[in-house]
Image (cartoon, coloured by chain):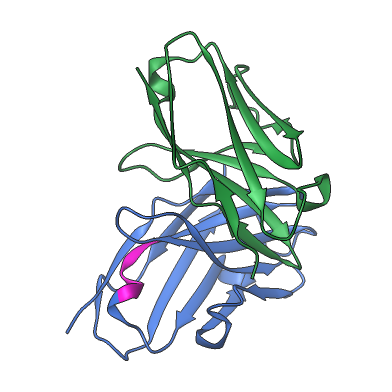
């Protein structure tokens, strides 16, 4: 079964920029994996941010962007706000099934 | 407006079968490309995708849990039911259902329901 790997934790200063990545054990992540990104704050259900690599939902703040970077899916936050502190999960489509990454805890400090 | 809500027991005993129901509104599971999925999250741990059922009754399961899971839909009731057999304490988690809209996986989530497995 595919294993999806994310950075366990990252720290960024308010107003800064940070990139989270998402790798697949099967090889390079491409658009065929339909990478998606989700944000989860404590005690809340996850909220979808990005789908199909780089597409934003209507509620996704403009400072969030998705891309493919060096064989991985990437989520970049530009102009980070204190309220962006959360756990972020990527999701990949592989062989007809979906796999979540282990999550990245983003600290804004 | 799309909404989903999970329901089911809060406590099950080891070896028992868990049955969870997702009741939704704001969309139809007879619409092409639409689906409903189940995801769980053990306390303090990551999300884990479990299963997905599409509008055409195509069903997908996590390979690691495939033998224990069954997903069904009742389009007339706007419900999706997930059963998981042979429950174990490691299955203790918050269980979520979520809407799948074409290429937008899990764009809308339910609030989740907490299931504890204990004797």
Stretch of the chain drawn in magenta: B90-95
In the image, taking residue A10 as reference, residue B91 lies left or right, namely: left
- Quarter containing the N terminus of chain B: top right
At x 31%, y 53%, the residue is B44
Which of B26/B38 is in front?
A: B38
Q: Residue furthest top?
A: A15
* Quadrant assignment, res B21: bottom left
At x 76%, y 48%, the residue is A29
Answer above or below: position of B69 versus B97.
Answer: below
Is any atom of residue B107 visible in this view?
no
Which of B109/A21 is in front?
A: A21
Please check the rendered image and state whether residue B92 is part of the magenta-colored stretch, yes or no: yes
Residue B115 x, y percent position in the rendering? 30, 68
At x 76%, y 52%, the residue is A33
In the image, taking residue B43 as reference, residue B19 lies left or right, namely: right
- Quarter containing the C terminus of chain B: bottom left
Answer above or below: position of A47 versus B84.
Answer: above
Answer above or below: position of B69 versus B8.
Answer: below
Please check the rendered image and state whether residue A1 is part of the magenta-colored stretch, yes or no: no
Residue A17 x, y percent position in the rendering? 55, 15
* Quadrant assignment, res A26: bottom right
Tint applied to chain B in the drawing: blue
- Letter of the green chain: A
Residue B26 x, y percent position in the rendering? 59, 49
């Amino acid at each position: 079964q595919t294993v999806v790997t994310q950075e366990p934790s990252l720290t960024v200063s308010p107003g800064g920029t940070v990139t989270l990545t998402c790798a697949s054990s099967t090889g390079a992540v491409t658009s065929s994996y339909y990478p998606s990104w989700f944000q989860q704050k404590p005690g809340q259900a996850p909220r979808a941010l990005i789908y199909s690599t780089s597409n934003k939902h209507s509620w996704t703040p403009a400072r969030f962007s998705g891309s493919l970077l060096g064989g991985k899916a990437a989520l970049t936050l530009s102009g980070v706000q204190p309220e962006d502190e959360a756990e972020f999960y990527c999701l990949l489509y592989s062989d007809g099934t979906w796999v979540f990454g282990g999550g990245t805890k983003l600290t804004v400090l | 407006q799309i909404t989903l809500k999970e329901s089911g027991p809060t406590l099950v005993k080891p070896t028992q079968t868990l049955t969870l129901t997702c009741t939704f509104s704001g969309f139809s599971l007879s619409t092409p490309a639409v689906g409903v999925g189940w995801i769980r999250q053990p306390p303090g741990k990551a999300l884990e995708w479990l299963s997905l059922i599409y509008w055409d009754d195509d069903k997908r399961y996590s390979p690691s849990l495939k033998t224990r899971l069954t997903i069904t839909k009742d389009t007339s009731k706007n419900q999706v039911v997930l059963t998981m057999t042979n429950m174990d304490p490691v299955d203790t988690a918050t269980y979520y259902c979520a809407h799948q809209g074409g290429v937008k996986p899990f764009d809308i989530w339910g609030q989740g329901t907490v299931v504890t497995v204990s004797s």
